[in-house]
Image: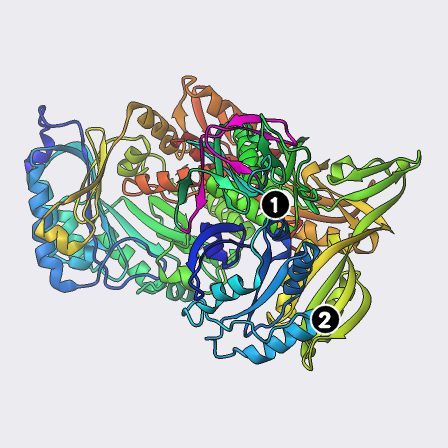
Amino acid sequence: MELEKERGITIKARAVRLNYKAKDGEDYVLNLIDTPGHVDFNYEVSRSLAACEGALLVVDASQGIEAQTLANTYLALDHNLEILPVINKIDLPSARPEVVCGEIEDVIGIPAMDAPKISAKQGLNIEEVPEYIVKNIPAPTGDSTLPPRALIFDSYYDSYKGVIVYVRVMEGTLKPGMRIKFMATGGEFDVVETGYLLAKQMQPAQSLSAGEVGYIAASIKTVRDTQVGDTVTDANNPAKEPLAGYRKVNPMVYCGIYPADGAKYGDLRDALEKLQLNDASLSFEAETSAALGFGFRCGFLGLLHMEIIQERLEREFNLDLVTTAPSVVYKVHTVTGDVVDVSNPTNLPAPSEIDFMEEPFVNANIFVPQEFVGAIMELCQERRGIYKGMTYLDADRTNLHYELPLNEIIYDFFDAIKSRSRGYASFDYEMSQYVKSDLVKLDLLLNGDIVDALSFIVHSTKSYARGRKIAEKLKETIPRQLFEIPIQAAIGGKVIARETVKALRKDVLAKCYGGDITRKKKLLEKQKEGKKRMRQVGSVELPQEAFMSVLKLD
Amino acid sequence: MNCRRRHLCLFSSLINMIYIHIPFCLRKCLYCDFYSITDSSLYEAYTEAVIKEIKEHKGKNVETVYIGGGTPTSIGDGLKSIIEAVTDNFYFSEDYEFTVETNPKTSDSLLINEIAQMGVNRISLGAQSFIDSELKTLGRIHTSKEIFDSVEAIRRAGINNLSLDLMFGIPNQTIETLGKSLECVLSLDPEHISAYSLILEEGTPFYNMDLSLPNEDTEREMYYLINETLENNGIYRYEISNYAKKGMESKHNTRYWKDYEYIGIGAGAHSYNNGKRYNNVCDVGKYITGSERKENITFISHEERNLELFMLGLRLKNGIIYNGEYPEKVNPLIKKGLLELCGNNLKLTPRGTDLANLVFMEFTND
């Protein structure tokens, strides 16, 4: 993916089949899946792990173990996999492979004496890796003669072939011509093609049998019939039980996504459906906003995930989007005793109906060099973190444990950690529990009218400062218009901050003679283009960035 | 001037306005984004090339000629040769207007006298400000006193149609200093004034300088002060940035705003000819060699032309004669208080004059 290259991160898991002749003279088939590391994409990791017999834990020889290294190791352990450490990037001047091996043994507790020390970039010692796999990872078991069961671990939409599903066959055999059934959705299709996923292309194969990883094309046109985690079986000779599948992921962060041009609503739905095939952790449902019209409330695993999805929608589907501020899911206990999940601040019941509210907390591990411990602890305090303790990774590094409210870390916490540790700290978290909390809904009013897409929920101790900041930010982002625009931040009916965008005084080209006409016309056309991209909200024209200003705190 | 100017040729094309561009300056002003160069070794060759182009249009009837720049008077004798070619090759109407732009550093009385003798009857003098420190900030090469000297020379040459360029929104300019400049302007009793607000154009030294510019509010106050002062003294605004005594409005420029066609001669000069807009190559060297002179030829469709009539015509204080065209564009603008109908005339309101781009942009292509 272009986006992965630009950002230098892995977003999507990638599967590949490798034919390998080992030193013992035997031919082996290795099925490898490369996975992302960032916590926002750990659904990609856990899905891949379920399709495997073992895992290579690749550790950077200069960075050492990072918070996500630990998190991903635990995921692999959960799946009972053989874990093999590999030390990469030994070509870097700051590489310290021996120290890192020690860290792996001390911190994670798995032997690392035999770990290959390689440089994938320069091709150093890489031949050790497949040998290492052949020697240590057990070959898949599974009976090819049983009724087939294959786990769908990924899928995508191909405009010619329809939905292509990636499977790990656990038992039995799948081949073209066979009528298959998706056990959870009940959809039945005729297999058109089966094949292997090679490094550069997909290679059709006569069949896929137990232990193999590959793809199935079956002219599947309806995206909804395929679900990652579902089990594929023979419709005429079905397996009795589906495979364990995947734990359904619960999105942690929600935001509203709207087409900039209201007429593109259908295109956006189409795009989301297709993207969901390729990214099962994305969820969405239709919603409407008074300010933005028809759109979708989308759920993500984190802010990076949200950013990536937005960008993929814009790039891969050529859509122009307006997104609202992200929100976590609050549990609202009403006076009548009901518990309501609220992920869209607009849906928060009236204060008189609310008994109390709870917000999600996470357990966070922050790996940080000694010298930045103070700075990071300060940051966690600012974000309402509860200190849980610290452990020493080695003489120089510490693992800080905090409980943090999710709504304090979804915005810019990751960046803040990096900037306060000069890039050295790493961070990982998992959901812990809901905690009763003093939360309020902050509304923003433009010209006296609440703009629903700008409302958000915030801890009461932070509401004043946030209200002021956002009002200031909006003042910067909203261009001067025909009339003066008052901006107010309010809690309930009470205004807590006010700014004013003054009326536009001047917008006129002083000169326009014969030689200027063509150029000035172009200028005016450009200005008109910019005006068109604004969202009309009541009497006010809002640029798209205004909806994200709630995000930018610094 | 010879007698040909009084006899109109009945068979010449309809275009009767000519613009001639002289892209030379003694020095470049810091705010200027027009193409001009300071290399005097090219004067002669350039003059020849312009005269050659003038001859291509031989026999045209003209009502207005405008020689602009740059600083046309900076090339001295070359300018005289060009004026001679103009009068030799075109037929002038009875009430022709022939303008030459100049600046206070290049308006020596001898040259002004000569060109007045040759038929030039209007001078546009780039005064900009009468505060020496402001002139220096702008990178102008003249002083306030030199403006007075130039005006004296121009008047002595018998020119009774003088236009002064004035600038506002200059770095460090205040309402007070603008007031002083306006007093000086009035003491010179010009027939016409163009008052432009300074615009920072990309590619100019000003664009990248850290300047203390008057804010938007002060800048508008300056505009209102100019309006009020000049109108109180019998010099009326007739276009967004142009003022004149009754009957002394620039005929040439008014034709641009009425969307007349015109022919541009010289490097970088724009033409609007036979429904097409195009420009000559900007680079003086390339212009002189004459290869591939015309660039950016754009055909203006009937629809575009109708839109241009609004975009340009609404710059005029009295606006345009309105017959109900584009009600979907016009009515909302009236409702917003930017346009008004006075009898048959559709024109900018005072607020619309400050925010004219919001009006003009409605009359551009989607």
Q: Residue at x 58, y 36 (%)?
A: A148
Chain designation of label 2: A
Q: Residue at x 54, y 51 (%)?
A: A13
| Viewer-closest of A207 and A75 | A207
Q: Secondary structure at mark 2?
A: strand
Task: Report how far apart the C-alphas of labels 2 and 1 lie in the structure.
Answer: 38 Å
How many residues crowd mark 1 within 10 Å: few (<14), some (14–19), many (20+)? many
Q: Is residue A48 positioned above or below A73 on the image? A: above
Q: Secondary structure at mark 1?
A: helix
Q: Position of residue B163 (x, y in %)?
A: 31, 47
Q: Is B58 colored magenta in this rendering?
A: no
The range drawn in magenta is A172-199
Quarter residue A257 falls in: top right
- Give the total of numbered labels: 2
Quarter residue A81 falls in: bottom right
Q: Which residue is mark 2?
A: A399
Tell me the quarter of the image containing the N terminus of chain B.
top left
Q: Residue at x 14, y 45 (%)?
A: B293
